[in-house]
Amino acid sequence: MRKDGKICCHHFEEKIGFKDIFILMRETINPGETIEDALKRGLTEEFNIEAKLIDFLGSIQSQYKDRNFKLEKTTIYFLCEYLRDLDRPRDITDMEGDSIIEWLKPADLIKKMKDQFNRYGREDADESKIIEKLLK
């Protein structure tokens, strides 16, 4: 989140059969890696920014089908304060490398996320609860 209150997110015009999707940064923690190191790596790879970890915001548990498998996932969220853009090219080989990076007002992002949940019915497509908790 920047000082002006806008939140950085990925915007995928189209991704694996889904259109017009907005998501927050998601990073898998590698073995032996701390949460802080995973956040720093993810912010660098996905958004090409540096940010400071501020607080734990909560988690979302979701279930969805991928092909013929039922998947269950827990995603944990942290508030990070934007510090600066990095002077390096963005990692376009990363899974999120084909996204458009956007800074949106929380209310706009909440609306977009609720809409995409209504379109696709996937719990992991609606991170609006985390943003709403941040605003409280």
Image (spheres, rainbow, N blue to C red):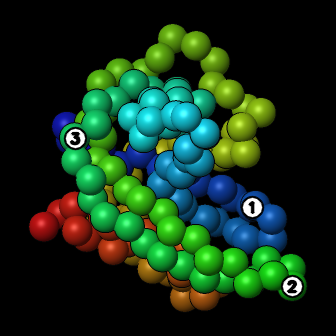
Image point 59% across, 48% down: which residue?
Answer: 28
- Mark 1 lies on residue: 14
**Residue 77: % across, % down:** 38, 56
The C terminus sits in image quarter: bottom left
Q: Mark 2–mark 3 contact, CB under 8 Å?
A: no
Q: Earlier in the sequence, mark 2 or mark 1?
A: 1
Q: Which mark is residue 54?
A: 3
> For this view, does 68 lie left or right of residue 73?
right
Height in image: 71 above or below 19?
below
**Residue 116: % across, % down:** 56, 77
Q: Which mark is residue 68?
A: 2
Image point 28% across, 31% down: which residue?
Answer: 52
Query: Extreme top residue here?
Result: 87
**Residue 4: % across, % down:** 21, 41
Q: Between 37 and 46, which is closer to the camera in this rendering?
A: 37
Pointer 3: residues within 10 angstroms few (<14), some, or many (20+)?
few
